[in-house]
Amino acid sequence: MLGKLLKYELKATSRVFIPLYIAILVVSIVNGLSLNLEILNIQGLATIVLMCLFISLFVITIVVTIQRFNKNLLKDEGYLMFTLPVSSKHLVLSKYLTSLIWTFLSFIVALLSFTIIFTIATYGDFNYSYFINEFNLLFSNISNILGTTILSEFFKIVLLIIISYTIFIFNVYLALSVGQLPIFNRFRNVSSFIGFLVINLLISYVQNIVDNAFVNIEAIDNINYAINSVTSIVSKGLNIAIVINLIIILVLFFATTYILDKKLNLE
């Protein structure tokens, strides 16, 4: 059932993102051509339009994340959604996965956009094979020096970024869920905003406590060790950050689904 919900969410939100992606890629082509042909007036306008499109993409991603959860689950549409033979966990997960997918696709479109501009703008003047060979040589040298450590730590950092974004999304979901409680019925939007700030402060407080405890422990354990232990400390720090943030995600997720199951107050 989660798959069907996800398909429904992607279809409902694609009408917002797909036209925006197409517009970004078209403007990128125009930008690249104007750079290559040195048509400065068009290039300047295309750059401004492209910046506006990227800003719009960032804002729309956040707005859609909030709107789909709030409108679909906490307002009139919620009466229909909660009559479906699915759990609130599946409903929340479908919203989250949809947001994550569009965020990932937006990142891909951004990379593709800059690649298009660079490729068209430098066409005929840039030695791509030389650049690729030099990049491969550099990456090979770094890998030989640091082994697999750099790759593993890089993937941990990427995972931590995804986890941090997930915390943001579930923070929004929990704040919206808290804001619809009967006690806040007259001030839903204000309550949700304040709830978001409070939850964010609590998360930061927990993270700071863990970070400080880790730094103090490592300082005691490694006080007599050489600097080569820095890599190990960074690795341990990333591991702890990942575990703590995953626990935070679980707390936010189950708190949200508990409110939806036990304290739902539809308009």
Image: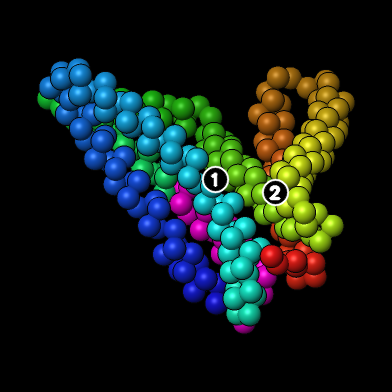
Q: Residue at x 73, y 52 (%)?
A: 188
Labels 1 and 2: the sequence-earlier one: 1
Q: Looking at the image, which residue sits at the far front?
A: 186
Within the magenta stretch, is there residue 87? yes
Quadrant hosting residue 164: top right
Q: Nearer the viewer, residue 57 or 208?
A: 57
For the image, the number of numbered tags is: 2
Q: Which mark is residue 21?
A: none
Relative image position of residue 99 (x, y in whole percent): 52, 53
Q: Nearer the viewer, residue 229 or 248?
A: 248
- Magenta extent: 85-104
Relative image position of residue 149 (x, y in whole percent): 57, 36
Q: Nearer the viewer, residue 82 or 137?
A: 82
Relative image position of residue 87 (x, y in whole percent): 66, 74
Q: Looking at the image, which residue sits at the far bottom?
A: 85
Q: Amino acid at mark 1?
A: Ile
Q: Which mark is residue 62?
A: 1
From the image, tell me which residue sits under label 2: 189
Helix, strand or loop at label 2? It is helix
Q: Residue at x 76, y 42 (%)?
A: 194
The quarter of the rendered structure image containing the C terminus is bottom right
Q: In the figure, 198 relative to 188: above or below? A: above
For the residue carrying disc 2, how many other residues have a C-alpha within 10 Å: few (<14), some (14-19), or many (20+)? some
Q: Residue at x 47, y 30 (%)?
A: 144
